[in-house]
Image: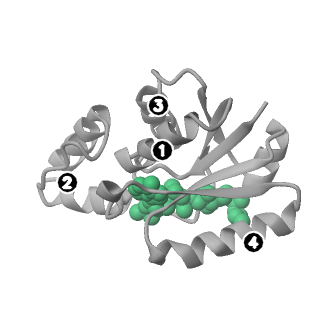
Amino acid sequence: MRLGIYPGTFDPVTNGHLDILKRASKLFDKIIIGVAVDSDKKTLFDIDHRVEFMKDAVKDISNIEVEAFSGLLMHFTESKGAKIIIRGLRAVSDFEYEFQLALMNKNLNDSVETMFLTTSSEYTFLSSTIIKSVVKLNGEIKGLVPEKVEIALKDIYKKGD
Ligand code: COA
């Protein structure tokens, strides 16, 4: 079975992540989305919310599962018996970080490969951070994130007014 791990912080999931996932789901028998508890980022949403938003966003794609993981991505990947980590590449600016991540993971386990899919052009400018910044300043994010995420974000920043 071709099994892929799609890891990320997903704080929150955006339609850019979903674009990668929908396309990857056609290339793999099964994808496990690993929502990282331990990332270097201070997150807006706690792990339960990040997992819940992701589960809801992919509920109609039958070969995708969502799980939180803590500790090293490589240990999570090994525990699932997966041999491929899937990452999205948006622009040249992603390259250096992604290259470093992929090489470190390769160093940890040489039998696991990182596979990159290029993000569709309409989402290359998207990031979770830019979404949060725009909502905070009352900007419109319709069509860029799942509806439940949009509602939750607007709710948080309305309360913060
Ligand atoms: N469309 C839109 N945005 C995208 C995207 C796409 N296709 N692909 C990535 N992004 C954005 C994300 O929104 C995120 O934006 P942000 O920085 O504003 O939050 C950014 O690109 C990258 O985030 P993401 O894809 O969620 O990955 P990450 O860099 O947050 O996650 C982990 C990195 C979780 C994979 C890494 O920290 C990890 O492996 N952690 C576990 C601990 C570990 O093993 N560490 C050692 C690693 S060698």
Image location (x, y in percent) of residue 80: 80, 37
Is the Cβ of the residue at disc 1 closer than 8 Å to that at disc 3? Answer: no
User: Which residue is outermost to the front?
Assistant: 27
The CA distance from mark 3 to mark 2 is 20 Å
Q: Secondary structure at mark 1?
A: loop
The CA distance from mark 2 to mark 1 is 18 Å
The CA distance from mark 4 to mark 3 is 30 Å
Q: Give the mark toward the camera: 4 or 3.
A: 4
Is the Cβ of the residue at disc 2 closer than 8 Å to that at disc 4? Answer: no
- For the point 29% across and 55% down, which residue is it? 122
Image location (x, y in percent) of residue 17: 44, 47
Q: Give the mark toward the camera: 1 or 3.
A: 3
* Mark 1, residue position: 46
Instruction: Give the numbered dot on residue 135.
Output: 2
Residue 43 visible in the snapshot: no
Q: Earlier in the sequence, mark 1 or mark 3?
A: 1
Image height of 80 relative to 132, above or below? above
Amino acid type indicated by mark 4: Leu
- For the point 60% across and 69% down, which residue is it? 98
Q: Earlier in the sequence, mark 2 or mark 4?
A: 4
Image height of 141 relative to 105, above or below? above
Q: Earlier in the sequence, mark 4 or mark 1?
A: 1
Q: Earlier in the sequence, mark 4 or mark 3?
A: 3
- For the point 47% across and 76% down, which residue is it? 92
Q: Earlier in the sequence, mark 2 or mark 1?
A: 1
Instruction: Give the numbered dot on residue 103.
Output: 4
